[in-house]
Structures are given as C-alpha cells and as structure tokens.
Amino acid sequence: MPLKILPTPSELHVMRCAMKRGRKIHLRKRKNRLLKMRTRNDVSFICVLNLICILNLIGGARCILARLLDPDKVSWTALIDECVKNGRHDEATYCFHAMLLDGVMPDYVTLVAAVSACAKVGALGLGMWVHRFMTRERLEGNIRIANSLIDMYARCGKVEFARQVFDGMKKRTVVSWNSMIVGFAANGRCTDAIEHFEAMRRKGFKPDAVTFTGVLTACSHAGLTDEGLRYYDAMREEHGIKARMEHYGCVVDLLGRAGRLDEAMSVVATMPMRPNEVVLGALLAGCRIHGDVDMAEQLMQYLLEQDPGGDSNYVLLSNIYAAVGKWDGAGKVRGLMKARGVKKRPGRSAVEIDGDVHEFVCGHRSHPQAGEVLDMLDLLSHEMAGREAVSEH
C-alpha cells in the first residue's frame, strides 16, 4: 500500500489558520494520518506535533507516544521539546524516561530539554542522572548543556552543585552568570549573588534585565535597601535598561521590607504599566510586616482592578485585617472574593521517587495511588498514637 503524502509547510500554515477559526476536524485527520505512518518527514512531523501539543487534542504526550510507530531520536526529541515549550514538564520527564527505556540514545538537544523539564518540576534525581550521562559522553563542555545544568541545580536548591558546573566551564556567557546570580538570590545566598554580579562586570560581561532581577532580589532578601536602589538606578541610567514588571516588584519588595511604605506606594503609583499581582503582593506583604492597615486599605482599589481570578492578594489582605483583629475587614474581603467568584487555589506539592515526579493537590484524590498513600498515613498515625500512649505511661 503506497504511503500517503505528508502536509507541506504551506499546508500546515493553512491548517493553523483553520485551527484558529475552530476548524479542528481537518487537523485531527492530518494528525491521525501522520501518527499512523511508518516514515515521516521530520519538519512536517515537528510542525504537526507542535499543533497537537498546543491544542492538547489527544490528551497528553503519553497518548501521542502510545500511537507512534517506532519513534526515533528526532520524534522523541521533538516531543520532549514541545512538552517543555508548552509547560507540560511532567510529561516531558515521562517521555525522556520512556525514550531511554526504548533504547534510543539522546543527543545534546534532547538533554537540554530534559534538564529544563527537571528544573521546572524539581526532579533532582533525574537531573543528576542526566548530568552523569553528559559527563560520561563528554558533553559537559557544551555551553547550552552547562547553562541548563546550572539552572536545574539552582532551582532544585543545590547551588553548590551549580557552582561546580559554573567553575568548570571554560567559556561562559551572560546566561551562565545570570543563572548563578538568580540561583544564589533565590536560595538566600545574597552575598554570593552580589559578588558574582560584581565579578561579571569586572570580566567585561554586560548585565541584562535578568541579571538585575537577580541582584535586586538578593538585595531585597538581605535587607540591603540602599545598595538595591543604587543598582536599580544604575540599571536604568548606566545600562539603559527599562524597568520591567519584575524590577518594579523587586524595588517595591525592597522598600516594603524596610518599612519605607510611602516610597513603595509612590513607585507603584508612577509605574508606566498597571501593577500586577506580584507587585501589589509585595506592597501588601510590607503592610503586613509593619502592620499598616490604612495603606493596605488604599490598595483595595488597585486590587479590584486586577484579574478577579487571582486569589493571593485577597487572602493576604484578609490576613492583614485578621492580624490586627479587624475581623469585619477580613470578612468583607472574603465576601468580596465570593461575590467575584475568586477561589483560594489549593496547595500543591511534588516528590520525586525513582526518577518519577508525583504531584499532590490539597484536598484532591486524583493521584492514582491516593488510596494507598492515605492507608499508609492512617497506619503511621495509629503507630505514632500508640507510641505516644506508651511514652506517657
């Protein structure tokens, strides 16, 4: 039976336009035809795969894998990369596992995508395995791979491992320095973050917007208010970098932590764009730290103008009222949340076991082993209660 012709790039463009108009049936037919074929044109496959991932037409990467016939390295890499690009990092780590079990050896492009996924979901064990594989295959010298490892270790809280990779690099880029600075700042190593920032400048690297986000965060967490403001001024005046939303958030947090709430409010009021939840949350956090209920109430109007789907600032404002005993105010905020359909998002946590990342949502039993987990918790609770009773006697 002759093979059917794959869609050309121009046909794919038409398919994408049709998709935007709601005509998805044609795309599904093309997709089904593609997945059933034993020989694929790489460009066409990747293009259609991109559309599938964006639309989530078949319910996830695992379904795509189940329908692929003899996927090769290109297919696996494209699938993992598209999962990462579309924020489906748990699917990406699953696909990488499946790729290895299928006996397909990854290349450096696959490894960069896999490490990026590990960083996002905190899969440290899998990320370290990838690092060992890279070392064995002598791929550590690749700058993109080294940068991805630094980012992964920093996000997983292993900044010393990140530093080892950084120190071992023969050639560094701005991304390398940024990953270290941001990683140190996020993990409370503020002095190290600032020292790396100064070293970066001494070695002739030009800081960018990400660099200053990292150093401003470090100054905020360390309580270095004046130093942070000097860096903020240098960013705009010496380096010509326009302040972004994240920079405003850092400056507001910097001033709020220091109790300089009027200055923080002035920054918010003079922003060229409408402040988002992060900026307002930083100011509200300052109000909570210093018990300034009056200013928190002034922020109510800003809060009402934000996306009603966001819950964090409503909850924070309610907590500020509760902390000073203004229960009527707390009740008012809760009532406002209910009226606007704002629901408090449930907490989430994830744990990595044998390379697999398991996510749990507070109050949900969607995990396939939820019953076993709850049974084990009951068993542990009974054992702990029994030991407590014995210790009392």
Image: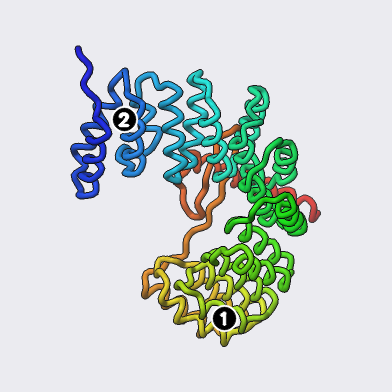
Disc ID at residue 283: none
Q: Is residue 206 above or below residue 236?
A: above
- Left/right placement of residue 130 relative to residue 102 reads right
Q: Percent from the top left, x then y, of residue 112?
A: 55, 35
Q: Look at the image and tell me whether residue 230 can be seen.
A: yes
Q: Percent from the top left, x then y, of residue 35?
A: 30, 26
Disc ID at residue 44: 2
Q: Is residue 194 above or below residue 75?
A: below
Closer mark to the observer between disc 1 and disc 2: 2
Q: Give the crowd class for mark 2: few <14, some 14-19, many >=20 residues within 10 Å.
A: some
Work out whether mark 1 precedes mark 2 in sequence or the reverse, and give the earlier one: 2
- Left/right placement of residue 289 relative to residue 321 reads right
Q: CA distance from mark 1 to mark 2?
A: 52 Å
Residue most extreme to the top: 1
Taking the spot 77% from the left edge, 50% from the top edge, the residue there is 390
For numbered disc 1, what is the local secondary structure? helix
For numbered disc 2, what is the local secondary structure? helix
Q: Is residue 57 above or below residue 209?
A: above
Q: Which residue is mark 1?
A: 265
Taking the spot 68% from the left edge, 49% from the top edge, the residue there is 180
Looking at the picture, tell me which residue is in the foreground, 40 or 66.
40
Q: Amino acid at mark 1?
A: Met
Q: Amino acid at mark 2?
A: Ser
Taking the spot 45% from the left edge, 72% from the top edge, the residue there is 273
Looking at the picture, tell me which residue is in the foreground, 332 or 310.
310
Q: Give the crowd class for mark 1: few <14, some 14-19, many >=20 residues within 10 Å.
A: some
Looking at the picture, tell me which residue is in the foreground, 253 or 226.
226
Q: Quadrant of the N terminus?
A: top left
Q: Look at the image and tell me whether residue 382 can be seen.
A: no
Quadrant in the rendering for residue 322: bottom right
Q: Quadrant of the C terminus?
A: bottom right
